[in-house]
Image (spheres, rainbow, N blue to C red):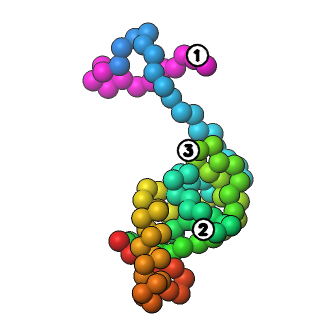
Amino acid sequence: AAMRAVVPNPGHRLRAATFGQATLYAADDARTPTVPSASLVTRGGGTVVYVEDAPGRYRRRSVTVGEDDGTYATIVRGLQPGERVVAKGSLLVDAQAERQATAGAGAEGGEAGT
């Protein structure tokens, strides 16, 4: 949709009457956590994300996904607002957690490190 906007232009890098692309985000009063769709890992019949326990330490957590537009997904159960999740490379973290579980290290809870 065409629209008109006034935006800051430090350094005068933007030119008048040019076209661009923007993504609009609206506040969500429900405080429903939203994560990048790339964070989601399908395991069996469910979905998990990897939540940061400490810097470089992640724990697998089952979640219930609401809407997913292919870019962002809302999490309706299993994640609290403000919790940090792996945004990129979640499949690699999942593979590492599986290797550790198979080897017996971190088998309880599906912990994974970097």
Q: Foreground residue, 112 or 46?
A: 46
- On the image, the x and y values in percent for residue 23 come to 54, 33
Q: Which residue is mark 3?
A: 71
The number of discs equals: 3
Q: Amino acid at mark 3?
A: Thr
Q: How far apart, in angstroms, are the residues tagged by discs 2 and 1?
A: 41 Å
Q: CA distance from mark 2 to mark 3?
A: 20 Å
Mark 2 and mark 1 in contact? Answer it, CB < 8 Å: no
* Residue drawn at point x = 56 percent, y = 51 percent: 37
Q: Which image quadrant: the C terminus?
A: bottom left
Q: Nearer the viewer, mark 3 or mark 1?
A: 3
Instruction: Report the disc number at residue 35.
Output: none
Q: Earlier in the sequence, mark 2 or mark 1?
A: 1
Residue sitting nearer the eye, 84 or 105: 105
**Extent of the magenta region:** 1-13
Among numbered discs 3 and 1, the one appearing first in the sequence:
1
Q: Return the residue at label 2.
A: 43
Q: Given contact means CB atoms under 8 Å apart, are the residues at marks 3 and 1 in contact?
A: no
Residue sitting at x 47%, y 76%: 98
> Which residue is rendered at x = 69% and y = 63% of the image?
64
Which structural element holds mark 3? loop
Q: Nearer the viewer, mark 2 or mark 1?
A: 2
In the image, is residue 102 part of the stretch drawn in magenta?
no
Quarter of the image for the N terminus: give it.
Answer: top right
Q: Is residue 60 above or below residue 107?
A: above
